[in-house]
Amino acid sequence: MKHLKLHWQIIICMVLGTLSGIIFNTIGYENNTIYTLILLLGDIFIRLLKMVIVPLIFTSIIVGVSSIKNQNKIGRLGLKTFLYYVSTSLFAILIGLTLANLIQPGIGAATIDQAGAFDTSKLTSGTSILDILKRMIPFNPISALASGDILGIIFFALFFGIVMNFTDSKYSSPIKGIIESIYHVIMKMTQIVIKCAPIGVFGLMTKTVSNTGLSIFKELGLYALAIGLGLSIHLFIILPLILIIFVKINPMQHFRAIASAMVTAFSTSSSSATLPVTMKCVKDNVKASNEVTSFVLPMGATINMDGTALYECAGVLFIAQALGIPLDASQQFIVVITALLASIGAAGIPSAGLVMLFIVTDAVGLQSDAVAIWVGSMLAIDRPLDMFRTMVNISSDSVGAAVIAKSEGENLY
Ligand code: ASP
């Protein structure tokens, strides 16, 4: 197993988990010690993932935001970059929202008998937008960190990162160095946690299949199709349109220029790991200046994740549909906003987007084991979706660099 690529290991464990799930579904799993131990593997994996969320978000946002330096041009670049990041991510989210509402991939899943797997009475779905906006500002950042109040952490980290740029470097440099160090260590920890994914997937698949039977694949098939379709629309229609309108070139020329970055993103599922390749492609082939490239891309790898944003939105609507809790317009608005924040907060590493789903589900009040079970099911087929959304993420970063370089009067390609 050790010599196999991670995604193959995950696929193999997914199949094994499915088989063991079918076996336990057939023979029954009440009071079965082996079954309990297998489930423990999945639970431990989910706990490990949740464990790294807070430090990861806190440090990655500060590291990303504080790379905006404090000068006139930087201010202008900052505004353009921000506008590009937010508008393309929102576009992607709206595609996800539309498709999830049209295709309704989770509706059939609600009929799957998951009785006994969790207590659905614990689910609530009501919370107001004003509440969410108010809750974004933490009373106390330390307690926000301690209690895992993700929205509060994101708000504080953004504010902190921005203000750090306006603070005398005598004071900001030491803390910046420390936060960067923590960020890199946490990234490493997360990578190690992701390495446990095959074992975790085995436990999670066993749990899902033993509880629900094989119908899960049908429902998740539709879910994967909805996400895949959304990502394709964004990559093959929206981004090319942006290139035609704002950069005035044939989109094929751009995709050829960044092809090696796209392939790297696809095979690593990590925007951060792909960053050096993306920067090289944008500098050497798109011929954007050093200034624009080093400003737009590193931050983009952490903050601008169109594919992830689309996935957060569609994924949460899927879970809500599967749980039989339809989200009304105001709740869907909350999903849009938190999906944007979650995509900003997601680190550029494999499956980070999946972990961030919990933020969006929490924001609309979907908090129970049931959510974790569905996220577990989604994890089983996350790898191919992650490969695709990472490719969309870095493609959007590179298009952003081209748009901003062009707007600064640079000669490209
Ligand atoms: N793997 C993605 C990236 O690195 C993040 C995600 O999981 O959506 O861009």
Image: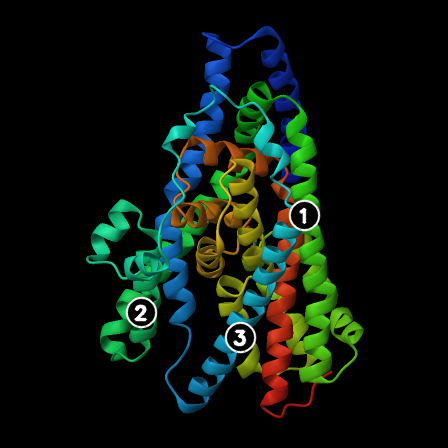
Mark 1 residue's CB less than 8 Å from ligand 1: no
Marks 3 and 2: in contact by CB < 8 Å?
no
Q: What kind of residue is marked 3? A: Val
Mark 3 or 1: the one toward you: 1
- Closest to the observer: 173 or 43? 43
Question: Quadrant of the rendered structure where residue 159 is?
Answer: bottom left
- Residue sitting at x 70%, y 78%: 243
Left or right of 197 in this view: 261? right
- Closest to the observer: 324 or 268? 324
The dot on residue 222 is none
Q: What kind of residue is marked 2? A: Phe
Q: Quadrant of the C terminus?
A: bottom right
Q: Which residue is mark 1?
A: 103
How far apart are the two marked residues, 2 and 3, measured between alpha carbons?
Answer: 19 Å
Q: What kind of residue is marked 1? A: Ile
How far apart are the two marked residues, 1 and 2, measured between alpha carbons?
Answer: 38 Å
Secondary structure beneath dot 3 equals helix
Marks 2 and 1: in contact by CB < 8 Å?
no
Q: Position of residue 24 (x, y in %)?
A: 58, 12
- Residue sitting at x 56%, y 25%: 208
Q: Position of residue 13 (x, y in %)?
A: 63, 27
Give the mark, 3 or 1, whose residue is nearer the N terminus: 1
Marks 1 and 3: in contact by CB < 8 Å?
no
Give the mark, 1 or 2, whose residue is nearer the N terminus: 1
Mark 2 residue's CB less than 8 Å from ligand 1: no
Q: Is residue 196 visible?
A: no
Q: Which residue is mark 3?
A: 296
Image: 37 above or below 285: above
- Closest to the observer: 87 or 326? 326
Q: Which residue is mark 2?
A: 159
Secondary structure beneath dot 1 equals helix
Q: Position of residue 200 (x, y in %)?
A: 52, 30
